[in-house]
Amino acid sequence: MSHFLFWQRWLVVLSVLTSVFGLLLAFLSRTALFDVLFNRRVDPVFWGDGEPAAAALLFQGWIYGVVGATVAGWGVMMAFVAWHPFRQKQRWAWNCLAAGMLVWFVVDTSITLHFGVVFNAAFNTILFAAALVPLLMTRKEFSGEGGG
């Protein structure tokens, strides 16, 4: 497998995993699995040692569902871009993935840090690095004039 194909496939797998995470967040955010992996790290930032009120739990169920659906859709879109146009070395595909990741990372992480949710900022940084490395490793492949 070529150097380029390794990184292209890396991006596809990362995108699919992003979609899976989004679906899990949408449908399992109030389950024991997410309670251990996610809620116990986020909830104390807003409710201290106490449990969120019933209304807050309803809101969390809705907002995590909406955010999860958005993340799942974002991952599907990234997978399609990474699978075909990126593999064909169409410059717009590299630009699309790089710009999308950068906007997401800066906005999401800034808001996350403003609210003090360090766990999410760390998660964002890991995901951003996992996407940034293949983008940097393939940049030279997109420097030609072709591909729009």
Image (cartoon, grey):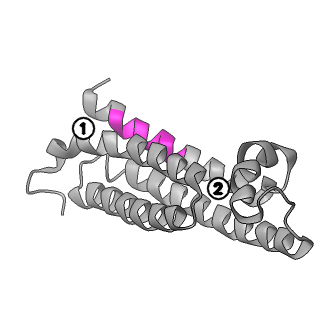
Residue 42 in the image: state x and y as whole percent. Answer: 69, 56
Going by the image, does 65 lie left or right of 73?
right
Question: Callout 1: few (<14), some (14-19), or many (20+) C-alpha neighbours within 10 Å?
Answer: few
Let me know if residue 92 is in the magenta part.
Answer: no
Question: Please, is residue 77 above or below residue 33 in the view?
Answer: below
The single residue placed furthest to the left in the displayed view is 145
Residue displayed at 78% across by 56% down: 29
The residues tagged by marks 2 and 1 sit, at their Cα atoms, a distance apart of 26 Å
| Residue segment shown in magenta | 7-16
Let me know if residue 12 is in the magenta part.
Answer: yes
Q: Secondary structure at mark 1?
A: helix
Magenta stretch prevailing secondary structure: helix
Q: Quadrant of residue 57?
A: bottom right
- Disc ID at residue 22: 2
Q: Secondary structure at mark 2?
A: helix
What residue would you read off at disc 1?
Answer: 137
Camera-nearest residue between 125 and 92: 125
Camera-nearest residue between 103 and 145: 103
Residue displayed at 47% across by 60% down: 109
Residue 138 in the image: state x and y as whole percent. Answer: 23, 41
Question: Callout 2: few (<14), some (14-19), or many (20+) C-alpha neighbours within 10 Å?
Answer: many
Amino acid of disc 2: Gly
Going by the image, does 141 lie left or right of 60?
left
Residue displayed at 77% across by 64% down: 47
Question: Please, is residue 95 above or below residue 38 in the view?
Answer: below
The single residue placed furthest to the right in the displayed view is 54
Quadrant of the snapshot with the C terminus: bottom left
Going by the image, does 74 lie left or right of 83?
right
Amino acid of disc 1: Met
Of pointers 2 and 1, the one earlier in the residue sequence: 2
Residue 8 in the image: state x and y as whole percent. Answer: 35, 39
